[in-house]
Structures are given as C-alpha cells and as structure tokens.
Amino acid sequence: SDWSADSWSDYGSRDKPGTTLGRTVPDGNVLFPDIFHTDHLLFYERFRAYQDYILADCKASEVKQFIAEYLGKVLEPSGWQAIWRTDVFEVLVGVVGVNFPALKAIVQLSEPFLCESQDSSFTLECMQELLELKEHQILLQELWVVYDESGEFDQTALAIEHVRFFYRCIWRMWDEEEEDEFDYFVRCVEPRLRLHYDVLEHRVPSGLVVDYQNLLSQCEELYEKFLNVRNSISSNDSDSEAENVSMVEGLKLYDKVEHLKQKLKLIENPLLRYVFGYQKYGSLQAKGLRPTGAKVIHVVPWTVKVGLLHLLARDKLCPESCENLDVQFHRDPLAAVNACYEGDRVIICPGHYVVDGVFCIADSVELEGYGLPDDVVIEKQGKGDNFFDCRGANIKISNLKLVQHDAVEGILNVHHGKTTLENCVLQCETTGITVRTSAELLMKNSDLYGCKGAGVEIYPGSACTLLHNGIHHCKEGILVKNFLDEDYEAPRITMVNNMIHNNEGYGVVLVRPAMPSEMKDASAQGTKGIFPFLEETPKTRNTQPAQAGDETACTEGSRQEQPGCVTDELELYKQAETSEQTENNSEIANVLGATSAKKSQIHKKRLSELGFTEADDNLMSQEMFVSVEGNQFKWNGKGSFGIFLF
C-alpha cells in the first residue's frame, strides 16, 4: 500500500490545521481532561479503515502484524496523554513510548495524580506498583486519548479507536486458528461489521440479537475449556487412560464449538441470517381460564353509536350460545387482547386503530372485525420487531386489515399452536407471516403484499395450509426453510388455489444446503466462497406458449378476416397456460417431496451407523406431506419455483 502523506490527506488530520474530531467530557466525579469523541464513526468510515489501511488482504494469522504495521505509520510514539480505563478504575497517564508488535503503550502516571475507582484502595503507591508489575506497558485499546485542539493527535485517537473496536466487536479468540485460505476481511470483518451496524440501526430482530450474544458467550466459554483440555494433553507425553479420556473430551468440545461457530456465521451473513430460526417470547405464559370460569366478549372501542350497538347485539352478542357471557368494552384492540383469557372473543367495530405495541397472544382467543377488512384497520405505530405473536393452542383472526410500518421482523409470527387467518388483508413491511417449528397456520381467503422478504416463511416441523389466498408484490412469495438437519422434521404443506404473482423473485423458494456434487458443479462454474446461489428449475421460468403452425395459420387467416382463428388462438393460449400452471404445481410438489425423501435417506443412514437396522415405520416415514393444486403463478420476476442452496 502507498503510505505517503498524500494518500492520507483525506483521512485524519496530518495535512490539516486544527483538529477535525469532536470532544467529550468523561463521566464520573473526578475532573479528568476532555477526551476525543471517536466512538460515533459511521459504517463506511470503519469499513474503509479496515479494508484500505489496516487489514487489506491479510490472513487471520497475520492480523496482529498488519495492525502493528498500521500503528507504526500513524501513531505518535510519545508526547500525549490518555485515560487508562478498566472495569474497576480510571487513571490519567502519559505515553512515553509504544511497543508496536505487542500493541501496547509504555506509560507513566501523570501529574497531578488523577484516579477514580469503585473503592479507595487505588492510591498513588498502589497504581505505581501495578504499573511496575506490568512493566509500564498497557494495551492500546484500554486508552482514551486526551483531547488536543491542534490536530496533532487526531490520527492517534482514530487509530486507537479502530484497534479498540476491532478487538471488542470483530475479533474472536478462535479466528487465528481458522484456515488461511480466504481473505480475513471478506470472510470475517465485513459480515461482523455489517451485523454490528444492522443491530445499531434496528434492522435485526431483538430476539435474534439476544440469541447471537448467547451463542457467542457459549462459544467463548466452550472454546476456553477446549484450549485448557488441549493444553493439558500437549503438556503430558504419557499414553495414559486419563489422557485418552481428555482427548475424547477435547473432541466433543471441539465439535460443540464448531457447531456454535456455524450458527454464528449464519447470523453474521446477511443472506443467511433468517435461515437460522430462533424462539422468541419463550417466557410468555398462557393465562388459562378465568378463576370464575366465565368467558368474556371484548368489544372495541369504548364508545359505540346506538345503531351500531343494535346491529352488534343482533349479530354477535345475542346468539343462544352467548347468553351467559359478559361483555367488556376497551379503548383499542391491544388493550382488549391483553385483557383476554382462554376462550375469550374480541369483536372490533369499524374504524382505523393505531397501536404502539405487539399483540402477544398465548391463549386460545378469537379476534374478529365487524365488517369488511378494509373497514376494520389496525395499524402499527413506532419501531418494533413484529406485530402479532401467536402462541395459543387455537387462535383465530378474521375480517381485519393489518398495516405494518418501519418494522424489523414480520407482521405475524406463529410460534406454537394453531393460528387461523381468514378473510384478512396484510400490508407488510419486512417478512410477512412466519410459521415456526411445531406451529400450524391455516390461511384462507386472505391477501398479503408488500414484504421486503418472503410473504410466508415455513419452518421445519411446522404445518402450513394456504387456501384461496393472494400473495403478491413481495421479495419472494413463499419460502420453505431447510429441513434436512437431523434435528428437524419435514413440514406439512398444503397449497390450493392460491394466486402468487408479481413477486420480485420466485413464487416459491426452497432453502437447503448444497450437496457435495452441487458444490463441485458450482466450483467448476467459478462460484467462490460460501455464499449461496440459486438453482433455477427449467420449467419455472415465465414463458409464453408457442404454437408455430397454428400461429402462422391464424396470421394468414387474419388477412382474410377470419375471426374464428382469433378465438382458436385464445383457446390455445388458455390451454397452454393451464398446462403450464399444472406443471408448476406438480414440479413444486415433486421437488419438495424428493427433498423430504432425501431427509429420510439421511436419517436412515444415521440410524444404520448407530446400529439400528430395523426402525419403526412411523419414524422412517417422516416425509413431507405436500399437496399443491390449482395454484396460479404469474409475473414473478424469476419464475414460479427456485432452490436456494447454501
């Protein structure tokens, strides 16, 4: 790289008079001097620094060397002050030198002595003794550079910020042992950096963020145990039984670490992030029946006109089955749902309701709009993960229009139990409906549109029935997630008479891992890295029927004004279109069924390896139940059906 002064004229302040960085006042009771404000950098600023100036195309094993070389070119070796921060104290120090290979600064206590700690034990003598034990060398990432308006130390403050951010947010303790075949920046830095900023900008569901942090903590803990076991084996040359036991334990820990690392990579990769499912609102508990055993009809809103109340009483409140039910009135739908117990019913009168919150439904309740969906609109206000979270054994939502804005997650999540969606309109923002593992969705006579992801996401082990729906103007129509993993069962899918049209990608997409033969084919075509690719099935592209001979005949006939040929051509077109739609339905069913059969083969092979030569028929026949009939696929950008390999 060209490290001349010209190449740095737009980065830092070497050629600019005065500082270009802001300042901030340190927290606490001690009057420390102000420090440079550097933790507000934008994504592209950090991206450019790591890619162009710090890491470039280095391998994982070369990271520390590249950082040391970078610091050697931009860091002032002495003459500046900083606040040394740890978990228990902060102290002002002066930097008199830098040990670049170790990424450490050589410091001494500043005068006057300024220190703040959780207790009074960190006196001047105590700090001097601590520095002597450390040979006056401390990690650069523990230093916050004291503000200087001259601009002389701008690059020093920025460089230390980049090192601090890298080791806090990017670097993992196992990175150095990863294979060096790939560019470290491309493989690790960029996806982790993007994830960090996606989280900051609320583009990742909070549940997924929690899962990622938990996975990272588990992986770090297991990796430390693995290192301890490995070190104990390498330091002992004897071939004892205890060492053999340690070796087996080490292999088990290694397998667990690798499994967690793969899950972390799935979340870090923006293309695969949502292939990895997570369970949200796991602590949400059903209320069950009321202590009195009574059931209640909840009516929204609080005030209702007399004419509407009369109609409501006639149609909904006075059937024979409702004679002993209580009626409660609520200001908005969210308040009504929050007041529900098992078996309750919510009737929402015509109106446009704006709510700020999530509908978390853990009991078997029914939400019904009194009127047409366009007359009963529930609109979500404010940022949030998703709109409806359904966990009840039997939930029914009907005659509603749900409108979602500025969201992170989908409009409706079915986590457990069965949710029925009937005669509804869903105007989505991110993904549409997600059917999680062990959950069931019945959606009929509904319209779903506007998703930036998939309209319907079907997870392994779920059941999804789609009847007479419209799914359109989404990124993908329906996405069936990978179910080849040994921990998952195949989903049960029924799709009948749906209209899936005008989606940006495919009408239906199956996500699954690439088989070894497919990876070889991809390599032969120049596919690099672990990024996914789409496999198009030959019959799914949007095609127009061609009947060359008949077309010619009708063209000639049109000159002789024979209108019968126009009718014949339309009939031929309709027949060809019907034939194509039938082929699309059959192909989707066949591919999904074949993938399910592949899972059964893999499962059978694993059982055989474990010594189970005879297995229960029910256990071995866990193939996907697929019924795909009468669906129409029109004007989807990439065709009716595709396979997403990763």
Image (cartoon, grey):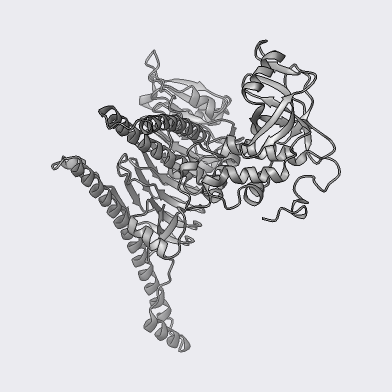
Total numbered labels: 0
**Residue 123 occupies quadrant:** top right
**Residue sitting nearer the eye, 467 or 76:** 76
Q: Position of residue 429 (x, y in %)?
A: 55, 44
Looking at the image, residue 510 sits to the left or right of residue 38; the answer is left
Q: Position of residue 541 (x, y in %)?
A: 42, 65
| Residue at 65 percent of width and 52 percent of height | 52
Looking at the image, residue 108 sits to the left or right of residue 626; the answer is right
| Residue at 28 percent of width and 29 percent of height | 245
Residue lying at the far left in this picture: please name it: 614
Residue lying at the far front in this picture: please name it: 237
Q: Position of residue 302 (x, y in %)?
A: 57, 24
**Residue 406 occupies quadrant:** top right
| Residue at 41 percent of width and 61 percent of height | 522
Looking at the image, residue 380 sits to the left or right of residue 240; the answer is right
**Residue sitting nearer the eye, 172 or 378:** 172
**Residue 156 occupies quadrant:** top right
Quadrant showing the N terminus: bottom right
| Residue at 74 percent of width and 34 percent of height | 37
Looking at the image, residue 460 sits to the left or right of residue 271; the answer is left
Decide if residue 181 is in sight here: yes
Please say if 558 is above or below 215: below
Q: Position of residue 589 (x, y in %)?
A: 31, 55
Decide if residue 422 is in sight here: no
**Residue sitting nearer the eye, 491 or 52:** 52
